[in-house]
Image (cartoon, rainbow, N blue to C red):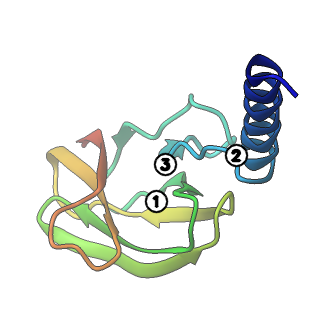
Amino acid sequence: MNLSLALSVAVFVLAIAAVVYVALNPPCEKFTEFYILGPGGKAAGYPTELKVGQVGEVIVGVRNHQCETVTYRLVVLLGNETIYATEITLAHNQTWLYKLQFSPTQRGRTKLELLLYKNATETPHRTLHLWLDVK
């Protein structure tokens, strides 16, 4: 067997091995989806104008695309007060949805803030907020 034929066969075998490896171990883009939807389940109809004591509702969603199981911690603040906190463990490609209800207690412009922490970190991995005009 001549040298060029041997090199061609070796390159061909390496190429096949690379294709098989990528097919069995696809690359994974690591990210987390974190979103809020209006009560109708769409990115519209957010409760931005409420009266004191009136109940507002949004749907909070988290989807794990981290290529591994991740434990998240969600903290929700209304103004400076924590109104909801929970821990969520999601496998890769798993989604968590929650109907969050809240009721402002003071008039004025108030911030509903959602902080998502990943794997017990001290700094939020993702944040969202919704401004409320409370009358």
- The vertical placement of 4 against 97, above or below, is above
Q: Which mark is residue 30?
A: 3
Amino acid type, mark 3: Lys
Q: Earlier in the sequence, mark 3 or mark 1?
A: 3
Q: Earlier in the sequence, mark 2 or mark 1?
A: 2
Q: Which residue is mark 2?
A: 26
Amino acid type, mark 2: Pro
Q: Is residue 60 left or right of residue 132?
A: right
Which quarter of the rendering shows the C terminus? top left
Q: Name the one closer to the observer, 3 or 33.
A: 3
Q: Position of residue 126 (x, y in %)?
A: 31, 51
Q: Disc 2 and disc 3: Cα gap in Å?
A: 12 Å
Amino acid type, mark 1: Val
Callout 1: 10 Å neighbours few (<14), some, many (20+)? few
**Of the two numbered discs 2 and 3 in the rendering, the one whose residue sits closer to the viewer:** 2
- The vertical placement of 72 against 51, above or below, is below
Q: Which mark is residue 15?
A: none
Which quarter of the rendering shows the N terminus? top right
Q: Position of residue 70 (x, y in %)?
A: 49, 72
